[in-house]
Image (cartoon, grey):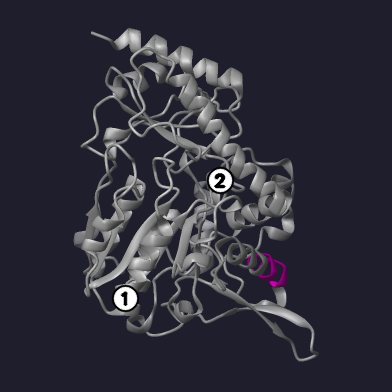
Amino acid sequence: MPYAPATDDDLRHMLAAIGVDSVDELFADVPEAARMRGELDLPLGVGEAALVARARAHADRTLDLSRTPSFLGVGCYDHYVPAVVRAVVSRSEFATAYTPYQPEVSQGTLQAIFEFQSCIAALTGLPVANASLYDGATAVAEATYLAEQSTHRTRVVVLDTVSPQVRDVLATYASAYGMVVETVAHEPGLGTVDPQRVLDALGDDVAALVVQQPNAFGLLEDAPRLVADAEAAGAVPIVSADPISLGVLEAPGRYGAGVVVGDGQPLGCAPSAGGPAYGFMAAQERYLRRMPGRIVGETLDADGARGYVLTLQTREQHIRRERATSNICTNQALCALAGLVHMGWLGPRGLEQLGAIQFERAGATRRRVLDIAGVTSPHGAGPAFREFLVELPVPAEAVVEAAAAHGMLVGWPAARGWPALPAGALLVAATEQRTDDDIEALAAELERCIAEVAP
């Protein structure tokens, strides 16, 4: 966005308007010990033309996914975003105030959020959903805090087939809330977790069990059994679900999940260097009053007409801090709207077809990659949803770096998230965007890079 800085004259007018003599007076309440004196250690400024040229040079270093096929995933995927999404979210009616506190002037925004909640509830098979959260990782962390508050227990069991970034965020939250996270490792030759090992980890001090379905390797856990075992142990079963997968897989709420969360990025949001996107959360009704963030409800006005309002506002903004369910006071309204439009554009049948394509593209890509000499599949040849693991005969880090230097994203070195995996482990994602020509280009690039980095 173009930026025109304020002039010295502008500053004088603004200071006069608020009745102060200098910018320093604006910081008078900040303790002297916390204030920096002197100049920042920054280079001298440059003219606008030079600055724009420098910014463009940096931008040119970024890979353009419209011209370069991406096989990078690990929670952020290159899905097609239909034109109708941008057409709707770009309308001025949705450039609203930060918070729709005044329902009489915010009915459009409130209705859009309500419809988003309704779609998420239908997708997850649960009766209530909130207005969205920051992303999928914080949604998982918030769900575990909901579980801690509901059960008054302090231990969380998480499968290590949950995405590494999500586990990192969960660990950060847990340390602040006084919870202990225990991780159950997957079976190396299967890529999934043995349900008996999970059952052994469950005890009367476990607040929640966190399962990702499909898991981070694109494989299906025995989620119904895991959910049932968690429920029997008195823990809250939390399922982190991919929204597109819910077009073809059973809704977690229908096999007993207490809370279903996930990252909505695959629906409505382009990768955009990692964000922004939106998280979603749905839950059984017994957890309704402990859900974080906003919830929009439907009501009737004084004339009996249908209307929408923020409801059950158990956040720090509205009640005493010690009684708040969360410090999340907002939602990703515009990104969630993009997801709503995308879901509406697809419809139930379109979402089912899109989900099926993820299995097909992953399978086609894996078969072609396994044709490369020395490449193996640690998890066999079973169905994989959009993402799969292969083992290269050379370190994956070196291959990924070499491919990036050639302008291609071939995957993610899996040892970054699972240190016990061999150095050659590469996690590859293939969405509906990846054509047969793209897959051939990937295979050719991998062959070239393997030869390049081989000793």
Amino acid tagged 2:
Pro
Nearer the N terminus, badge 2 or badge 1?
1
**Residue under numbered circle 2:** 266
- Compared to residue 155, the image places residue 269 above or below, namely above
Mark 2 secondary-structure assignment: loop
| Magenta region includes residue 112 | yes
| Crowd rating for badge 1 (residues with CA inside 10 Å; few <14, some 14–19, many 20+) | some
Q: Is residue 419 visible?
A: yes
Magenta highlight: main SS: helix
Front-lying residue, 192 or 293:
192
Q: Position of residue 257 (x, y in %)?
A: 45, 67
Question: Looking at the figure, which quarter contains the N terminus?
Answer: top right
Q: Residue at x 27, y 21 (%)?
A: 395
Mark 1 secondary-structure assignment: loop
- Compared to residue 287, the image places residue 331 above or below, namely above
Amino acid tagged 1:
Gly
| Magenta region includes residue 107 | yes
Q: Which residues are magenta?
A: 106-113
Q: Taking 328 as reference, is 203 left or right? A: left
Front-lying residue, 19 or 445:
445
Q: Is residue 26 visible?
A: no
**Residue under numbered circle 1:** 234
